Image (tube, rainbow, N blue to C red):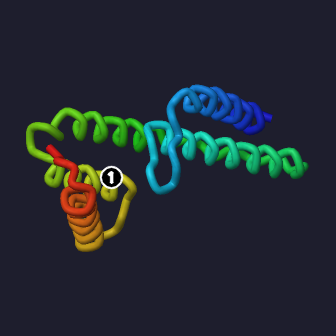
Amino acid sequence: MAEKIITLFFLLGSIVYLFFAQQFTFGTLGSPKSGFLPSLAGITALLLSLTLLYKQLRSNQTSVLDKVNWTKFIFIIIGLLFYITFLNMIGYFAATFILLFYLFKVADTAGWRMPLLISFSSATIFYFIFANYLSVTLP
């Protein structure tokens, strides 16, 4: 029952978000305006919420909720707060690399090589996408 209430909450939130996103000019696919991305995000959230609600209403099973590991949750929040704090001080690449590596280790990823490799490659790829392809300056 709680899952259905949460899904209805997200459905209502998607509708409100889409309503406010319609106040911006959408533009066209070839020349998007300020409302292009918010409208697409709102439509996607609405469709996903409707799909999830349909599946929940169709299913008669009651799901058993797993216990939440609050220590991991708190460590993730602490990592995100440090990321926000140090992003401008040490720059995008270093802050993102440290955050991703930290999150992999909090998630109990075994070993050191794979988290290092994934963190470094993700930070590098996203840096080049934003800096070279999108021409966005990153801190």
Q: Residue 126 is drawn in which quadrant?
A: bottom left
Left or right: 32 in relation to 126: right
Q: Quadrant where the C terminus lies?
A: top left
Q: Residue at x 64, y 34 (%)?
A: 14
Q: Give residue 5's position: percent from left, percent from top.
A: 75, 31
117 or 27: nearer the eye?
27
Name the residue beneath numbered marker 1: 103
Residue 53 image-quadrant placement: top right
Nearest the viewer among 36 and 90 is 36
Task: From this view, report whether residue 5 is shown above or below residue 31.
Answer: above
Q: Is residue 62 left or right of residue 80?
A: right
Q: Amino acid at mark 1?
A: Leu
Q: Residue at x 48, y 44 (%)?
A: 37
Position of the N terminus, as image quadrant, is top right
In the image, residue 70 lies at what x, y percent? 46, 37
Towards the viewer: 125 or 90: 125
- 48 displayed left or right of 62: left
Instruction: Give the mark count.
Output: 1
Taking the spot 82% from the left edge, 48% from the top edge, the residue there is 54
Residue 35, percent from left and from top: 50, 37
Is residue 71 or residue 25 the one in the foreground?
Answer: 25
Residue 52, percent from left and from top: 74, 48
Local SS, label 1 = helix
Identify the residue shown where x is 26% and y is 66%.
125
